[in-house]
Amino acid sequence: MKKFNAFFFLLAACSFNAQVISGTVMSNNENQPVPYVKIGIEKENIGTVSDGAGNFSIDLSGLDASRKLRIEVPGYEPYAETVQNFRKQSRQQIFLKEKVKDIKEVNIKIKKLVDKNWGVNTKTKSVLYSVNPKFRKEDFLGETALEFNASKRSKIKNINLNIASYTSDKPVLMRYSIYTEKNGFPDKNILEEEITVELTEDMIKDGTYALDVNEHNIWVQGKFFIGIQFLKEFEGKVNISAALFRTGFIRKFYGDWQKITLAAPAINIDVKVDKSAKNIKDEVAASGDDLEGLISDISQYNKESEESGYGKNKSLGNYIELKDTKLYYEIYGEGEPLFLLHGNSGSIKDFYQQIPVLSKHFKVIVPDTRGQGKSADTSHKEFTYIQFAEDIKALANKLGLNKINIAGWSDGGITGLEFALKYPKNLNKLIVIGANASPAGVDERLISHMKTQLLVLNVENKPEKFNERRLVTIMLKEPHISKKELSKIENLVLVIAGDKDVIKQDHTEMMAKQIPHAELKIYKNATHMIPFENADELNADILKFLEK
């Protein structure tokens, strides 16, 4: 697939040459002009935007007289008039009626608000949504939107737009909208008042323009869309970062929304999630990069593990040189050998809560899997779990260990299963935590996320991301351990997973059932991050199982 350096998302337009009607959009109650109003024909890509004084001109030539001219502005009642009636005057004023607000006192008791960020966060400069009035003036006034999905009631704090470059002779006028969802597309604007911004270059910090909407008190739940429209021509160009193979939505004026599956603009939002609110079943917390409810926030554990010193212990760290790799490992404690194997893209430090406890009872050997942590890999071959198992056998041989125990998390658990199949006589007991026997055992949402990630990596084709591509590929293509193979494992095995794991529970139960001497434990209210979030329980279960 060729590398894409830029994407121009363009909206088709129709042009006519005759009857032009001019007018002014006014507020009915205040008798003041309403600036920058979108005036268009229902279900058509035809229209205009009024200027700062509410003035407009629109060409209605060639249109069916029964078609409706439409205006929608937050805070005002929708305006609709047939083209036939609208043509009757060459110069007219359109009066918009303010919506009547029935304000009632509402007491909302919120027990816990949690900060989240949802949407597209990329800051790439190679894949772009380009806003360029000179390039196609007839297409400039289109609107783009991104879908979100809140499983719990959430308040929007900031709407962020990642901007790769900005060149303009004047402030760039933008309008934000928030739409409900209907049949998979944006529907009605839920805002009670206009959110319009005059964007200047100094408002963009570290490649992001963050619009604070906290005072607008915008609460959402379920599917919704954030829309952005540019309202006024300018000399220059604004390039917005975009994510490949993500779905965005575009339309012009009041035409139908269209899905764009090639890429989506980098719109993301900061929200406060009401964790005490009722959850919407069968919905993830947000579309886009966010996988809340599937992958939990582990930033706290990452920080603690980094500060622990494990994985960079100069006095205890060592290497074994194998073909195409230098495998890094650390050893703690004395006694019966226990290998701790981390998950995909992880490292030794992920077991910072297990090592100090387990090393009081066992000789704990913790390696960085090849191509991860401090272990290099110089080959250009795809990774395999069998290869990872062979590396563990080579390390055990070097240490003079004929028989070992293995506790493997995620990919480490898969490696443990492959070790059990290939080296049964060299394995004593095996603990697998959140592991799968085939890609079919992984939640489809995560699989979809990884497929998108791999497509982007392949299109970018950056040499420095070659290893990352291999790590994503192995999760999508492997393992392929059949039920028949699982039934051949004669070692004692403890199968652990969370009831909210990315590994499907029925798949975990199948594995435990097929392995003849397996025990199964499903942790309640637990995700895939058991070694982080359920460390004490896991440590106790490992000790109990190994000391039987």
Image: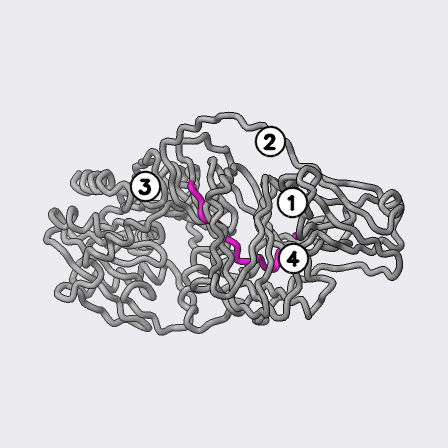
Residue at which label 1 appears: 185
- Mark 3: amino acid: Val
Mark 2–mark 3 CB contact (< 8 Å): no
- Image mark for residue 495: 3
Is residue 255 visible in the rendered structure shown here?
A: no
Q: Secondary structure at mark 4?
A: loop
For image coordinates 32% across by 57% down, the residue present is 346
Q: Residues within 10 Å of mark 3 (few under 14, many from 20)?
A: many
- Is disc 1 surrounded by few (<14), some (14 to 19) or many (20+) residues within 10 Å? many
Q: What percent of the width, then of the height, locates residue 527?
A: 36, 41
Q: Which residue is mark 2?
A: 101
Choose the circle earlier in sequence order: 4 or 3.
4
Residue 231: mark:
4
Name the residue nearer the viewer: 514 or 362: 362
Q: Residue at x 17, y 38 (%)?
A: 548
Q: Quadrant of residue 535?
A: top left
Numbered disc 3: secondary structure: strand
In the picture, the quarter occupied by the N terminus is: bottom right
Q: Is residue 423 magenta?
A: no
* Vertical side of 72 occupied by 10: above or below: below
Task: Identify the magenta region.
Answer: 259-272
Residue 287 drawn at (x, y percent): 52, 47
